[in-house]
Amino acid sequence: MSERIGVYVCHCGTNIAGRVDIDEVVEFAKGLDAVTLVREYKFMCSDPGQSLIQKDIEDGLINRVVVASCSPLMHEKTFRNVCTRGGLNEYLFTMANIREQCSWVHVDVERTTDKAKGLIEAAVRRTRLQEPLTKREVPINPRTLVIGGGIAGIQAALDLAEAGKKVVLVEKEPSIGGHMAKFDKTFPTLDCSACILTPKMVSVGQHENIELMSWSEVEDIGGYVGNFNVTVRKKTRYVDADLCNGCGACWEKCPGTRVPRKGNVHEKLSIGPTTSIYIPFMQAVPAIPVIDADTCIRFKNGKCGICAEVCERNAINYDMEDELIEFEVGSIIIATGFQTFDPTPIKRYGYGKLDNVLTAIEFEIMNCASGSTGGNIRMADGSEPKSIGIVHCVGSRDKHYHEYCSRVCCMYALKYSHLIKEKIDAEVYEFYIDLRCFGKGYEEFYDRLLGEDVRFVRGKVAEITEVPIEEAEKGKLVVEVEDTLVGKVRRIPLDMVVLCTGLEAHESLADIAGLCSVSIGKDGFIIEKHPKLGPVATTTDGVFIAGACQSPKDIPDTVAQASAASSAVLSMITREKIEIESATASVDEDKCSGCKICNSLCPYLAIKYDEEKGVSVVNEALCKGCGTCAAGCPSNAISAKHFEDRQIFAEIEGILSA
Amino acid sequence: MKYTYYPGCSVKSTANLYQESIDAVVPAMGVELEELDDWNCCGATAYMSVNEMMSFAISARNLAMAEKFHRDVVTPCSACYLVLNKTNRYFNDYPEVRKKLGVALEAGGLSYSGNIRVRHILDVIINDVGLEKITGLASRKLEDLNVAPYYGCQIVRPMYYGFGAGEENEEGFDDPDDPVCMDRLIEATGATCVKYSMKTKCCGSSLIGTEEKQALKLCRGILADAENNGAHCIVTICPLCQMNLDVYQPKVNSLFGTKFDIPVIYFTQLIGLAMGKQPKELGLERLAVKMTRPMKQILQGA
């Protein structure tokens, strides 16, 4: 049967037609070898557009399809389905991307049209050589791994567990709760953070469907959608979790300390016990302490042992070691959250050098009723500040650090103003660039603050200095700022300054992303499958994201995304089976020399060496068709189905000859 | 180490004491400065704000003439350093600027490919000569001399983010907010470096000619912070900074009722003193604020 290729050129409204001369492209395509039919349509992805293709296949006019439209990431699936519905093997279809790689990125119509022709000829030449492949189905393991036990991970785990599905929740800290557990109040409703969070934490700890692994980190992830193999390192607590009942005798008696004894009020900021054996905060889940080996006297000089003496259940074990635990899951939700920006590099703000310049998270802990100051706002020397400056956009909206807006800072800054006014009625200045109060009830909260005698100064703070010029500045922190509404540079003497440090991707996120084979954007956060329509999925099937690992988010948005991620997982689990890529690699046993190079190259551990035959063999269930082995094979013995050398070369020739 | 030397107008006139001290100290460091023949004024920062393209053009003339020697261009003046580097960067980053400058240079029988690196003499002494060499040359005991390093605003800040010529030195040679290279240099001479906050604050620059009071106010802040932190003298790297803080110091005193008496010297003068040279060889007798008695005593080892 000779190849009869149908080429379908999409206008995509004016997205493509505005830059590419469609008529010229159509005429060009008609002249290509094996092309029997060329059609153009305003939106190929629309129902009528799809029907055009389906009908042509059904009428026997064509037996291969090229659609010249957008990125395969957008609509490859759509058109593959069209082929299947028409009775054509979907691997006889190719997509030529003349939008993202052509009309959207070039200006000159003539040259853009030429490029579109090249891309179409490449697709046509490739399609002639493509072969039908059979789809494979694999069962889905209904268990899910949730990485990160902040509010995002907690919500996702609870949703799945409530639906009757098993979840493994891995948290690297001794307790779940994440950042939210450190907050006193949440904006804009000012409800108590712990009061709304702890019931959820307790549910996680008690839920029969949730296996909680705290003080643990994911070491390795292998496998593929529906069938991931996970290795988790359970870090040693030096406390036997099965024996410990969380009575607290150990941390009450521990003579070691994780917090500097001689530090000032700000250096000693903490929540929860400050001892070497500790739980991070009193509502910790699980309420099983951890020994901090860096500060524990026993680990330093072997001389202590008080915690073991006072423990009535003999749960303390100084010889405990890390454990590696392996298990299987079907899907993964990454919910690793964020870390706050470290303002030390912005030297003109004096953080770390000037007393009474604090980060937001430090101020948050200071306000926390269970923190070291008992929720009282204090200067480093313990006295009450009479004036406080709040500096917005520290590390955010700044091309030297993070270009993006961290989204939450304006609102928590307003919350701080309110708390300061409520607690000590100090003078408060907010130094802002723009106030972004975009959420439900947020603008109303700002409006309320306008009536609470807070001074709003629009301007990016240039410097915080302790060097006085005027008499009134002596002994104060001076904030130098251009008040852009007045049009003047102002110097404002204050007792204390809070830096609204932005949110950034957690330093471990790149490693986690690497383990899950998902990509990191230039802002450091995980790239979602589609910025608008696929916000919880990733480009790796079976791996989903929730919360601030995708972008800075507040609590409501995080919770919403976590529930969305769990529902995406549920819909996958409920199907029980999933189709996986047919484009796998295969080894030509006659050519294989048995050098085993491919064995170590394969990122999915899908290639094994067959001792008997003396050749390498691909396990098709594990192979993702990435092609690394095919490229690496020195004997040219491996070919990747759907990406064979002759197909790729035909594609290159097509681009070059147009 | 041979460099093409672009002195700039200041060191040839008002700041000739800077030139004298450079001449006195660089040979011992193995640095040879060959003055660029027929160089012209860079236009300084003032011209740039009046007619940018013209200012690029006159600076580019210097760069074009220097290119045939295939050596780094070295200047002792922060304004020259800034303007020449900015010209270089615009020449390399903006095709339309490159085009226009090409036409202008051609009219003068010149051409430029954009491959000259312009460096401040402080950068050369710290990074090419090295602090160990400075310590090796230091013979006079200066540890009782408290020296406040004054960097000014031009040397590290505007050019921090890239020289433009694709050099490995993309990030400039020091931190824009908290430079420390001169602190290290002062320590290398054996003197004691004074820590103070105003080391990169603007001295008022050419405002001294137009808005004198504003400029004097800025000078006051720098002098006060240095004095409060126990400085015997301030060390600068820029002719204009030196002039503002030195020559206008009496005016600061009369305007604000202060009693500053702080000599403001060039870093090359400090190196010369450390090397055991006499103040006269280094042009130190030409300071407006003369060396104070404590300072002289320290220099005499008393």
Image (spheres, grey):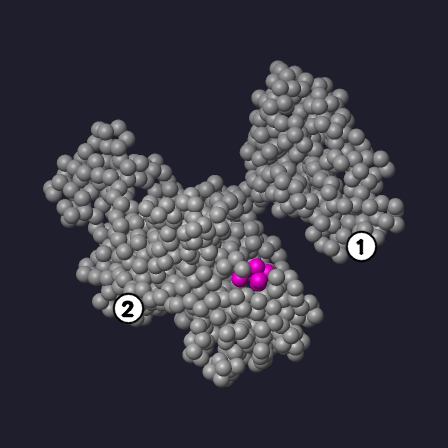
Range of magenta residues: A647-652
Magenta stretch containing residue A651, yes or no? yes
**Location of residue A538 with respect to A29 vertically, above or below:** above
- Checking the image for residue A623, the label placed there is none
Visible in this render: residue A609?
A: no
Q: Which residue: 57% across, 69% down?
A: A124
| Mark 2 element type | loop
Crowding at mark 1 (Cα within 10 Å: few <14, some 14-19, many 20+): some
* Chain ID, mark 2: A
Left or right? Give the position of A353 relative to B155.
Answer: left
Amino acid marked by disc 1: Lys
The image shows residue B54 at horizontal and vertical percentages of 81, 52
Residue at the spot of label 2: A576
| Mark 1 element type | helix
Amino acid marked by disc 2: Glu
Dominant secondary-structure state across the stretch colored magenta? helix
Left or right? Give the position of A98 relative to B77.
Answer: left
Residue B30, picture quadrant:
top right
Closest to the observer: B290 or B119? B119
Residue at the spot of label 1: B100
Residue B5, picture quadrant:
top right
The image shows residue A242 at horizontal and vertical percentages of 16, 48
The image shows residue A160 at horizontal and vertical percentages of 27, 65
**Location of residue A129 with respect to A294 vertically, above or below:** below
Crowding at mark 2 (Cα within 10 Å: few <14, some 14-19, many 20+): some
